[in-house]
């Protein structure tokens, strides 16, 4: 392979040149909320080892046998064009071991990356039949991004922990605690999907193809009836969402989902593609995998908090704006109150006392 590797290998000539990212760390494309969680988990020494030892309690081995026996394993002999895409994606993101990939009969368009010992990528026939080559390349890159980030491991582990927690839900307040855990996990899952969308763009290096793929997931194979600008306008309209009632309904709608809504994913990906971070990455300036062990958990959480604060400031959603205004007002009120208290009990009070003493001009004790 060469650095110009990419595209359709069946004719022996790449369809076009694509940049490669040697040694790239998944931190380069991870959403801030996803990145902070992963950095914290990676810092827990032995975390992976302990739960991989518990893999016998998980249906992973059974799942692998199921795909091997009742799905089609992608190779040079079967779905060779998908195999080429998979190798290209691993080459571009510098993933040493190419994960096994299967195509399984299912009319619902879907793809996933699962596994503890090693990631396995699964594509449904509904997805394979829906997408063209460049759209599928972005999806394969998306799943390879999951593998590089370690999402397959952490997702499986955290789902296992959730299942354990569900078994003790009979404990008083257990349901409340479990609901909180599940809600938090789903929020992370949704952010990890935004990370993987970015990885898909790095592999495909074709924003229009990524947009088309997301549009097809929303509206089927009717691109001649759809328009990217109009699709993105839907995301903007969704975010603005009328009044507070709509904001609450949006929260309730998204809570049970493992993926963000498709229009939101498209808007988020387009925004990232136009960012300075993406441009620097494409220019070859990105964090390296060899530096991951030195990553600061505190810095990652600070960046995540900063991202959420900026999201609140920029949001057009009525509820989020209200929360931001309340928080801002509380901050102003606290600042104003703090200033008044400092004036009364601090230097301001001393200054006032000094001025009063100066006005007396008699040198008498201020106790008078």
Image (tube, helix red, strand yellow):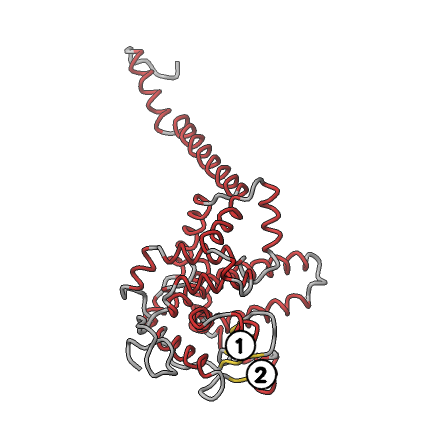
Q: Please provide percent x and percent y for residue 340.
A: 42, 27
Q: Quadrant of residue 36?
A: bottom left
Q: Quadrant of residue 7?
A: bottom left
Q: Residue at x 59, y 58 (%)?
A: 183
Q: Please provide percent x and percent y for residue 234.
A: 51, 50
In which quadrant of the rendered image does the C terminus lie?
A: top left
Q: For mark 1, does the 10 Å Cα neighbourhood hold few (<14), some (14 to 19), or many (20 or more) residues?
A: many
Residue 71: give its label. Answer: 2
Q: Is residue 38 above or below residue 344?
A: below
* Mark 1 touches mark 2? (CB < 8 Å): yes
Camera-side residue of 196 and 85: 85
Camera-side residue of 160 and 212: 212
Q: Residue at x 38, y 65 (%)?
A: 206
Residue receiving disc 1: 122
Q: Is residue 21 visible?
A: no
Q: Is residue 85 above or below residue 172?
A: below
Q: Is residue 328 visible?
A: yes
Q: Identify the element where label 2 is drawn.
A: loop
Q: Is residue 162 above or below residue 316?
A: below
Q: Is residue 335 above or below residue 108?
A: above
Q: Please provide percent x and percent y for residue 2.
A: 28, 80
In which quadrant of the rendered image does the N terminus lie?
A: bottom left
Q: Residue at x 28, y 76 (%)?
A: 3
């Amino acid at each position: 392979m060469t650095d110009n590797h990419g595209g359709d290998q069946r004719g022996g000539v790449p369809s076009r040149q694509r940049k490669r990212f040697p040694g790239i760390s998944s931190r380069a494309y991870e959403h801030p909320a996803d990145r902070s969680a992963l950095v914290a988990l990676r810092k827990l020494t032995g975390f992976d080892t302990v739960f991989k030892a518990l893999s016998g309690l998980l249906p992973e081995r059974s799942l692998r046998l199921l795909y091997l026996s009742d799905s089609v394993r992608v190779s040079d002999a079967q779905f060779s064009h998908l195999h080429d895409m998979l190798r290209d994606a691993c080459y571009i993101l510098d993933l040493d071991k190419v994960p096994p990939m299967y195509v399984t009969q299912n009319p619902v368009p879907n793809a996933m990356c699962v596994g503890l010992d090693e990631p396995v990528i699964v594509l449904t026939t509904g997805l394979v039949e829906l997408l063209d080559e460049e759209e599928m390349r972005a999806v394969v890159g998306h799943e390879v991004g999951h593998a590089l980030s370690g999402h397959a491991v952490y997702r499986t582990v955290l789902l296992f922990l959730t299942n354990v927690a569900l078994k003790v839900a009979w404990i008083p307040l257990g349901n409340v605690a479990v609901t909180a855990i599940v809600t938090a996990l789903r929020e992370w899952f949704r952010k990890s999907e935004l990370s993987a969308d970015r990885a898909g763009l790095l592999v495909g290096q074709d924003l229009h193809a990524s947009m088309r793929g997301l549009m097809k997931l929303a509206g089927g194979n009717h691109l001649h009836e759809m328009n990217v600008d109009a699709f993105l306008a839907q995301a903007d309209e969704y975010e603005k969402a009328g009044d507070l009632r709509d904001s609450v309904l949006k929260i309730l709608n998204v809570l049970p989902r493992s993926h963000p809504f498709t229009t939101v994913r498209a808007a988020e990906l387009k925004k990232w593609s136009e960012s300075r971070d993406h441009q620097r990455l494409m220019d070859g300036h990105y964090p390296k995998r060899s530096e991951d062990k030195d990553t600061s958990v505190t810095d990652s959480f600070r960046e995540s908090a900063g991202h959420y604060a900026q999201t609140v400031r920029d949001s057009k959603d009525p509820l989020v704006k209200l929360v931001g205004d309340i928080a801002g007002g509380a901050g102003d009120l606290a600042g104003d109150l703090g200033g008044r208290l400092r004036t009364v009990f601090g230097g301001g009070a001393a200054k006032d006392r000094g001025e009063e003493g100066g006005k007396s001009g008699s040198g008498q004790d201020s106790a008078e």
